[in-house]
Amino acid sequence: TVMDAPARVQENLARIRFQIGVASDALLSVTQVHGNEVLEVTALEDLSEMSADGLFTQLPNVALAIRTADCVPILMTDKKARVVAALHAGWRSAVADIMGVALKKIQEATGIKPEEMIAAIGPCIGKENFEVGEDVKLSASELQASESFFTPKENGKYLFDLRSFVK
């Protein structure tokens, strides 16, 4: 894995905070682990040592950040902008129903129903390039995933349309 120099990462985060107008301690993220853990942010605190793949908050002037490369970034809010959420969905998180987990936790914490939420799905690996094995296909079938998300290849693997699966 190629990682950017820490000083460059910090500079980029400072630029983001400046552009969106949040304090230096108000851009929060966690250590992502390709699971379906979603945490509620109830106070400004350093979450970088915590493991999860999703965050949500009702706090004003707080920004939530996730990092993705091939994985799917999902940003959510409700129609009245009372809550925001940021989710990291690789195939493991997606088939572990991270969106369903997030919606349930948001409803439990806020009373906001899933049908009141809207989501934006960001760029991710395309269905033309994401080769997976039978294990991913079987895992996805546990969520009653349609066969249409998988295109068989001659080598016994599949091309997986992760974006459509998440949608």
Image: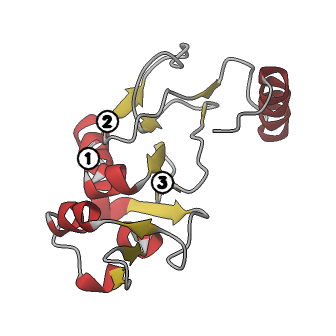
Looking at the image, is mark 2 or mark 1 nearer the viewer? Answer: 2
| Amino acid carrying mark 3 in the image | Met
Callout 1: 10 Å neighbours few (<14), some, many (20+)? some
Distance between the alpha carbons at the discs numbered 2 and 1: 8 Å
Crowding at dot 3, Cα within 10 Å, few <14 / some 14-19 / many 20+, comes out as: many
Query: What residue is shown with label 1?
Result: 101
Mark 3–mark 2 Cα distance, whole angstroms, equals 16 Å
Residue 80 visible in this rendered orientation of the protein: no
Q: CA distance from mark 1 to mark 3?
A: 13 Å
Q: Which mark is residue 89?
A: none
Q: How many marks?
A: 3
Residue 83, how many percent across, how many down?
A: 46, 43
Other-residue count near label 2 (Cα within 10 Å), few / some / many at <14 / 14–19 / ≥20: some
Q: Residue at x 61, y 51 (%)?
A: 69
Q: Is residue 17 toward the left or the right of residue 90 in the image?
A: right
Residue type pointed to by label 2: Glu
Three-letter residue code for mark 1 = Val
Q: Which one is in front, 49 or 19?
A: 49
Residue in the picture at 34% in, 73% down: 157
* Residue identified by numbered label 3: 76
Q: Residue 90, relative to residue 85: is it above or below?
A: below
Q: Quadrant of the N terminus?
A: top right
Where is residue 117, by image quadrant?
A: bottom left
Residue 138 screen position, x and y as percent: 18, 65
Looking at the image, is mark 2 or mark 1 earlier in the sequence? 2
Q: Which residue is mark 2?
A: 37
- Residue for point 56% across, 57% down: 70
Direction from residue 63 to residue 36 in the image, left or right = left
Question: Which quarter of the figure has residue 118?
Answer: bottom left
Q: Position of residue 132 (x, y in %)?
A: 37, 66
**Residue at disc 1, secondary structure:** helix
